[in-house]
Amino acid sequence: MKKITLKLLTFLTAVILAASAFSACGVDPNVKQEDEATADYKVKIDDEDQETERDGYYAYGKGKTDPVKIGDVTVNVKDYAVRSYELGFMMAQKKFDKPKDIPLEAAVQYAFIHVFYDDFYTINNKTVQYRSAQEKQIRDVLKTQFGTDDYDVTSSMLYNADKKIFEMWIPSYGTNIYYTIDAVNVSSDEAEIITTFYNELERKTLFGKATITVRVRDDKPVIYSLKAE
Amino acid sequence: MKKIMCVLLAVFLLVSVIPLAANAAEGDSKTITINENGDYVLDENDYNAVDIDGVTGKITLADAGVFSTGRSAIKVKNNSDVTFVLEGFNTIEGDSNAYSCGIEVEYGSKVTFEGQGTLNVTGGLWGAAIGSYGTDRNIPADQRVKVGEITINSGYINAFAGRRGSGIGSGYHVDANLITINGGVIHAYGNECGAGIGTGYGTSGGAIGVAAVGDYSAGRIVINGGEVYAATAWNQGFDYSDLAALNANDPGTFAAGIGGGYGSSAPDIEINGGKVVAIGSCGGAGIGGGRGTSSSSKYNKDTYTVNVKIGGNADVTAISADSRGNEINSGGAAIGSGRGSHTGGTIEITGNAKVTAICATQATAIGASKQKSPVDGATPVADSIVIGDNVELFAATAGNYAVDKDAASLSINDNYFGSSDRWFFGESAAAITDVANVKVESTKGDMTYSAPAGTVSVWARIKKQETQPDEPVTPDEPADEGKTGLRIDVPLKMAVVFEDGTVYYGGEMKDVTVGKEYAFQMCAVNWDNGKFDDNGNGIRGTVVYRMEVVHQDEFNELAKTAKEDPDRYTVKGIDIIDNVGKKIIINIDAKDTHLETDVNNFFMAYRFHFEGQDYNKQTGIQQVINTPLESLSVNLPLGSTITCDAYHNYEKVNSADILITNNSGEGIYEDEFLTSVNDYTWK
């Protein structure tokens, strides 16, 4: 509980500082901004999983949520369950067998958001939210997430070739995610995480299923393939 | 009854005594009669019916709703001359079970539409959305219902015909009269053989002089400005970039986009300016006559006429689509006559007009349908065709002459275009590449199109190689320095949201400062209420666009520079689109200036299909189309992720997520001209 309280205080402090710094500003498209604090900021704990999240939206995980190892590399399977939700349902990418199969616009938009947010489901914008990013930031996220930046990113519709930046109105993806990790199959070079998503905490009605595979690149776990339905 | 009369009297006194500020709907009554000259307001209340009786004046529609039962929603009668000033979002609906219109304009009366608001107006049974209702067949012309005069100066008008009516014009078995469009953004849809703009269902053929083909007339249609989109069916949309899909959506309406409904002639169509897109189908011309007949006893050769004049700086796209595969050899012309007529009529395209004419069948693109004449069995030809010196023409057909070479009279300036014979590209587009001063910019390989039978044998853009300098734009009035108003135009069912969070719908005015840059995003609205907000109505795009307004002199300088880099900039009289910077520079002094977002790059039109036929199958999109619809085509913002659901008999059977991007659908459209439409087929 202490750990949770500390996280909460740390985050609140950051939010207050950010809000103070930017509260007098309008939304200037040319100025990178931090998230505004939201009035309904809160932290909840799922009784079973001790999952904490921000801004009123939470990811409730059950099942085989313990981290696994591919060789010496630890994989937080809950993170990748959420990634499979983001890619499969929020970005509508139902299937890719390798990172290069992800359509350019989906890859860039996904990376762009992860420049600013750890999780899509916490994004709770109540109005337009402008962000801009440098090409290097996009490529860094692509490498972190997929182990490769082999995309023609500057041909994306999010790229402003005049300003030489990526720009985006950040959607409000905020939602609760209710999931159960059904199986985690680990081999010598990858972990396959099979997750079922539900529409409610009681897990009565099916939202969808996803199977994501994670491999290791440069001693770090990265997303390799996905199938969602 | 006394109570009702008292209320009505009170309402009448109120609206009469307090013009402009009056709220015409007081008390319990929602039926309003206005019968004295003056200015009135119909506000956000819902009304059952409104009668405007012998009135000269202004009626402001400010978020009004009129939903009638058993009659037209608004009747303008007894020689009224009223101007409807559009504010906000207005909905007017006739009764689909009664002969009625949305706005009925009785013969002798005149209506004019102005303002910057939106009007969604729907006709009732056999009725036009705006115009007349319908009557039974076999009523002689002098005894038929007639329609008054309709003028549109501005506003954002979506006119949906009732069954067998036109969007704007006449109802079933009724002649249209005078329709004048000077501005605004108009989407007009016919229904069951009614034209988008013109006549409703005329006839499938009957007694000559009474109900024969040609005995019904589209009257006089004049378009001087604005943006006009006219199609023959609600679900047809304007996605003419893929004719095969357009054909697939063709409900077989037999009517012209602009002109005649089934069996109706188009004696007087004049387009002098503005942007016009017209789609006819199933034997109806894009612009011109409706489908005729093969029977000489049902065809009145003395009255079936087609006269189309296009000039000025008009930007016209005319399409004749056809889903009836067995008629591929003889649909309607893109501009000219419908199938089953004796003549292609008279067609004159002059001035600096830019005309795109595409015929999905083997009729001529400009001229006559090539179905045998019902009069003598001969192949019909146009009476006269004139193509002016400065016209830019883009013509294609699935197997005939782009321009009717057999026209009885033909005028084309050979000095610019070389041998006139070369205008008739009956063999292949490649045949003209060696003709001096004619440039083929596109061949059929660039066109995503597969005709039901045969292929496109002509697909060529024809224009002078030496482009003429743009006509200097004459400012209406110099705008003041600093703040000024700018009209925001959007694609159908979309909105623009600026960086400060303000939402603008089509036709609304925004205060802007000259020289200041504004960032904005595109959003789809909730079709149920036409709104966008952050409470579940509509969906946002992610692409960042910008706009800046400048005065004429600066615009001219920028345009001059921009023309040197055509790959990056699209230069028009009203604006410069910077495709690299995703920015629009707007000439605030240009006539009819506005933010123009209903063009490529700002949205993606998605068409939803089902394998096999579409009947009783619907598609819904969460937050956008909560009530599922059949044969859906919907404009969506780039970068959004939609969750759509398929229904069969309104029972959900499938679901899918789609990230909306330029190439997110089934189609691959590499031509810039074709980039704003895509397809999704439910399996």
Image (cartoon, rainbow, N blue to C red):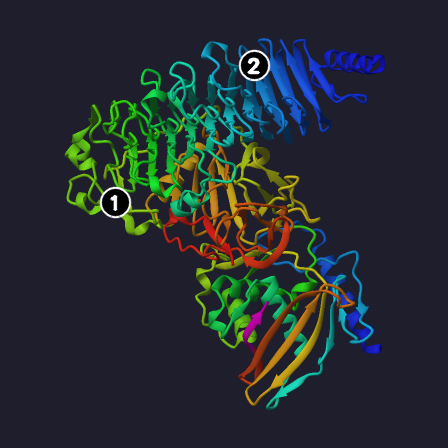
Which quadrant: the N terminus of chain A? Answer: bottom right
Tag 1: Cα neighbours inside 10 Å, few (<14), some, or many (≥20)? many
Q: Please name the residue that numbered disc 2 is placed on.
A: B106
Residue B240 seen in the figure = yes
Find residue B457 and name its label.
1
- Determine the chain carrying the residue at label 1: B
Residue B305 seen in the figure = no
Left or right: where does residue B181 sit relative to residue B673? right
Where residue A47 appears, as percent x and y from the top left, is 83, 73
Q: Residue at x 53, y 28 (%)?
A: B480
SS at badge 2:
loop
Q: Magenta part of the protein: which range?
A: A223-229
A78 or B569: which is nearer to us? A78
Q: Looking at numbered disc 1 in the image, what kind of residue is underneath it?
A: Ser
Where residue B46 appears, as percent x and y from the top left, is 72, 28
B118 or A155: which is nearer to us? B118
Find residue B551 and name its label.
none
Tag 2: Cα neighbours inside 10 Å, few (<14), some, or many (≥20)? many
In this rendering, the answer to whether A163 lies above or below A195 is above
* Mark-to-mark CA distance, 1 and 2: 47 Å
